Image (cartoon, rainbow, N blue to C red):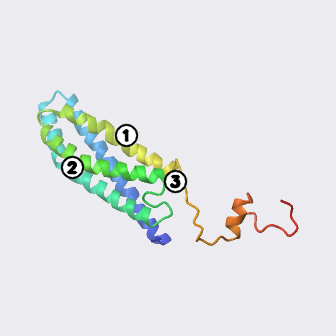
Amino acid sequence: MKLKTRARKWWLVGHIVSAGAWIGIDAVLGILVCTALLTDNAAVRATSLQALGLFAVWPMLAAALLALVTGAVLGLGSKYGLVRYWWVAVKLAINVLMVVLILVALRPGIAEATTNPEGLLYPVVVAPGLLLFASVLSVFKPWGRLRKESHDPARPHNGTDQALRNGRRGRGPEPVGARR
């Protein structure tokens, strides 16, 4: 499946916006946790912890799932695929891992935060780091393909394939009488 240019751009906008929302929600989570830990005012601490319970899990999960879906559509609808390039596969793994951690670690951690907000320091440090790493991967696209393309003898070869194998790299057909 190949996405048309206009559709790809809209899916890309959705992916960027959902990832940005996820980063923003994560930043607010960090601010609320740090406020609860650093304040001497009991009312401010209680309000911060109460806001965590209302704000952190479900909006963050929604943004994470939206980023996962839009990223999967973009991967399936483009030359990058879901597991064709290392950087896409790593981003996919990070996204799935973080969705699972939101459900199995953050959600119970928010409930325990009223008695022990220090337990939320780990997600406040790790999640932004992983999201930043995924953003860097999107921009720099490192590491290349997961596995090299195999030579398929059944696939017909055209002149471009032959020119590439001969080291000509797109300079057009070989001139008549050219030396090798």
State how far apart marks 3 and 2 are (Cα). Answer: 31 Å
Going by the image, does 14 lie left or right of 139?
Answer: left
Q: Amino acid at mark 2?
A: Leu
Q: Quadrant of residue 39?
A: top left
Q: Residues within 10 Å of mark 1 (few under 14, many from 20)?
A: few
In the rendered image, is residue 154 in sight? Answer: yes
The residue positioned 18% from the left and 46% from the top of the image is 107
Going by the image, does 114 lie left or right of 86?
Answer: left
The correct choice, above or below, for 89 with respect to 170 in the image is above
Q: Amino acid at mark 3?
A: Arg
Which image quarter is the N terminus in? bottom left
Instruction: Depth check: give the residue in front, 102 or 35.
Output: 102
Q: Position of residue 177 (x, y in %)?
A: 88, 67
Instruction: Depth check: give the residue in front, 43 or 57.
Output: 57
Nearer the N terminus, badge 2 or badge 1? Answer: 2
Nearer the N terminus, badge 3 or badge 2? Answer: 2
Which image quarter is the C terminus in? bottom right
Q: Which residue is mark 1?
A: 129
> For numbered disc 2, what is the local secondary structure?
helix
State how far apart marks 1 and 3 are (Cα). Answer: 24 Å
Tell me whether the residue at label 2 lies in contact with that at label 1, contact meaning CB atoms closer than 8 angstroms.
no
Instruction: Depth check: give the residue in front, 145 or 155.
Output: 155
Q: Residues within 10 Å of mark 3 (few under 14, many from 20)?
A: some
State how far apart marks 2 and 1 are (Cα). Answer: 19 Å
Q: Amino acid at mark 1?
A: Gly
Q: Which residue is mark 3?
A: 145
